[in-house]
Amino acid sequence: MARNIAVSDDVYGMLSKAKMEGESFSDVIRRLMERQKISDLPKVLEEGEWEKVEGAFGKQKELDLQRAKRLL
């Protein structure tokens, strides 16, 4: 059974951006309500943001390695 819900324009915009090819809005809401995995981030983030996240992960990994070398 389908139900109608009202969402504000900004929420509609966010759902539209999160919508992947072939997904219905119900699919988007279902996917977003489930526990998110780190591998889902590139699908949800704005264009160019994933590269920033990857860069931060890389920088942190390098800092962790440097710290481990100092401690050993």
Image (cartoon, helix red, strand yellow):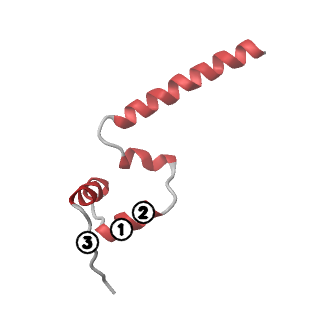
Q: In this rendering, which labeled residue sits more in front, label 3 or label 1?
A: 3
Query: How many angstroms separate mark 3 from mark 1 (CA)?
Result: 17 Å
**Are the residues tagged 1 and 2 within 8 Å (C-beta)?**
yes
Amino acid at pointer 2 = Arg
Amino acid at pointer 1 = Asp
For disc 2, the neighbor class at 10 Å (few under 14, some 14 to 19, many from 20) is some
* Nearer-the-camera pick, 28 or 23: 28
Q: Residue sitting at 35 percent across and 36 percent down?
A: 49
In percent of width and height, residue 66 lies at: 64, 15
Q: Which residue matches tag 2?
A: 31
Amino acid at pointer 3 = Ala
- Mark number displayed over residue 56: none
- Mark number displayed over residue 27: 1
In percent of width and height, residue 8 lies at: 24, 62
Q: Residue sitting at 49 percent across and 63 percent down?
A: 34
Looking at the rendered image, the quarter that the N terminus falls into is bottom left
Q: Which comes before the other along the chain, label 3 or label 1?
A: 3
Query: 67 above or below 49?
Result: above
For disc 3, the neighbor class at 10 Å (few under 14, some 14 to 19, many from 20) is few
Q: Which residue matches tag 3?
A: 6
In percent of width and height, residue 39 lies at: 48, 47
* Nearer-the-camera pick, 58 or 29: 29
